[in-house]
DNA sequence: CCAAAAGTGTTAATAGTACACCCATGC
DNA sequence: GCATGGGTGTACTATTAACACTTTTGG
């Protein structure tokens, strides 16, 4: 016997993306004004529908690329939102993904070609459907993930100062950290390379730049190391 | 303009459940032999399809109840598995849920009425499609969740001994724990009630029974307490 | 010479880990 | 009276948290 699937209900499956950026001061999300009904003119996450011939990761990447021109960034599936009437127009489920992007590197393509806008997570407009809930869940996941995996670097330029890194973690975790303790902890992890190069923008003295050493990190993970901040 | 959803692809959405139980010795999962093609006769998680008029949590509960007679247990959404050819018969996505059940309390209904079988997670048959992957992900999530939320109790009888609790955590975390340190830690959390009642099965002396005090736990959470084992 | 951010160590407190003996009971 | 699992506390170690002054340099 072959089970006949043809009597089962099929559904529309959306993919919505919470796109995080960091501008040296605030954690931000990228939103767009929805240009069709329902909820036309209101702020929304970037989304689209899953196609038959792609999996969800591919759909999330396609949608991100289509709406921002951005490719190859850290993305992670978050949760499947499924309340029956979440979209009043039609029964739709939505799989939320979040992405981490380096604002500086992508500022050009974003502002030039697309109508998206950055908002601080401490102050963003209310969103359509259940998108606010998605954002809150994404922030919670981001807090956890950045504490247990070295993904915070995805939000920074390739070369960054200790102060930028500290500020980033302070912003994500929403708490002040002690400068010396933070640096000691980071240094003890031994997964950064100190460059012979200084950032001269932030001070007269200049501050050394660091890079995340992915190769070293991976080697350490092989030996049982696990990142924890 | 109303966006026309009618050209978008619709998909079949399955819900598969990883059902965990604990028998005082091993962490186990409940599996069934699939009785239809493809993969007829092979072991599988319990699953079914999402219906139009229910959300995913409801579907997971319905499927669990339908296949086991069990209701009202801890369930949590895990991940949406979406590889294009994961089910060779038809394009199907599957949202995995995991459930925690108290084997003792439900042994009757399970063995009497249904054809499901418990397997130790240390030794279970290989499963259809991507179900092995689902189980592995569920175990990882269970480890994390039981370390940060007091959900381990869901796997034990309402009244349990310290030894049962310790054995449970040892099994989930897959490491030996020190008896005194474990008890001290648990006691310092101050979320259990010690009963004036002993379990006389496991020893001649008998060992005191405890209950999880959900009310106390919730009150403490309100005040900023967070469970961590 | 001064303002502004960078860089750097030590101490105290806390949390975690290791460890061994007596107790109560049924047989 | 002895075998079996139950119950208990302390000393040591490692980790985390608190804290302030000197350095560099452009203006």
Image (spheres, coloured by chain):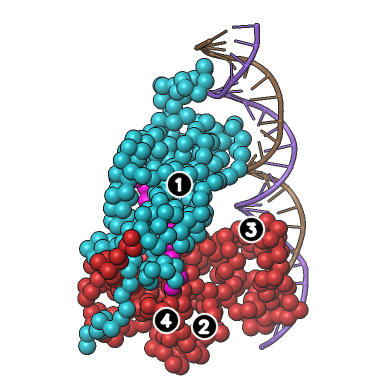
Chain colours: A cyan, B red, C purple, D brown
Task: Give the Cα separation between the discs numbered 4 and 1.
Answer: 37 Å
Callout 1 secondary element: strand
Identify the residue at image location x=34%, y=35%: A108
Look at mark 1 in the image and give the residue it sits on. Answer: A29
Residue at mark 1: chain = A
- The circle on residue B63 is 4
Give the CA separation, mark 2 to mark 4. Answer: 10 Å
The numbered mark, 2 or 4, whose residue comes first in the sequence reads 4
Camera-nearest label, 1 or 2 = 1
The residue under the point 49% across, 76% down is B21
Q: CA distance from mark 4 to mark 3?
A: 32 Å
Where is residue A54 shown, x and y percent of the image?
25, 61
Query: Dot 3 falls on which chain?
Result: B
Q: Which residue is mark 3?
A: B226
Farthest residue in the bottom direction?
Answer: B112
Mark 1 Cα within 10 Å, few/some/many (few <14, many 20+)? many
- Chain under numbered label 4: B
Task: Write the start and end of the magenta stretch as one range.
Answer: A73-84
Q: Earlier in the sequence, mark 4 or mark 3?
A: 4
Dominant secondary structure of the residues highlighted in magenta in the image: strand
């Amino acid at each position: 016997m072959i089970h006949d699937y043809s009597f089962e209900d099929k559904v529309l499956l959306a993919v919505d993306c919470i796109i995080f950026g960091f501008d040296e001061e605030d954690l931000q999300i990228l939103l767009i004004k929805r240009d069709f009904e329902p909820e036309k003119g209101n702020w929304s996450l970037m989304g689209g529908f899953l196609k038959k011939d792609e999996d969800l990761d591919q759909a999330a990447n396609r949608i991100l690329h289509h709406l921002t021109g951005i490719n190859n960034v850290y993305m992670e599936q978050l949760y499947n939102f499924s309340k029956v009437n979440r979209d009043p127009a039609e029964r739709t489920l939505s799989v939320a993904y979040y992405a981490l992007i380096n604002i500086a590197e992508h500022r050009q393509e974003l502002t030039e070609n697309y109508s998206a806008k950055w908002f601080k997570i401490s102050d963003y407009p209310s969103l359509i459907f259940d998108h606010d809930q998605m954002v809150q869940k994404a922030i919670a996941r981001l807090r956890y993930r950045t504490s247990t995996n070295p993904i915070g670097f995805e939000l920074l330029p390739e070369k960054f100062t200790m102060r930028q890194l500290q500020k980033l973690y302070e912003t994500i975790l929403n708490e002040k950290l002690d400068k010396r303790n933070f640096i000691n902890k980071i240094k003890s992890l031994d997964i950064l390379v100190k460059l012979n190069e200084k950032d001269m923008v932030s001070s007269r003295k200049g501050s050394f730049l660091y890079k995340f050493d992915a190769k070293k990190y991976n080697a350490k993970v092989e030996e049982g190391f696990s990142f924890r901040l």
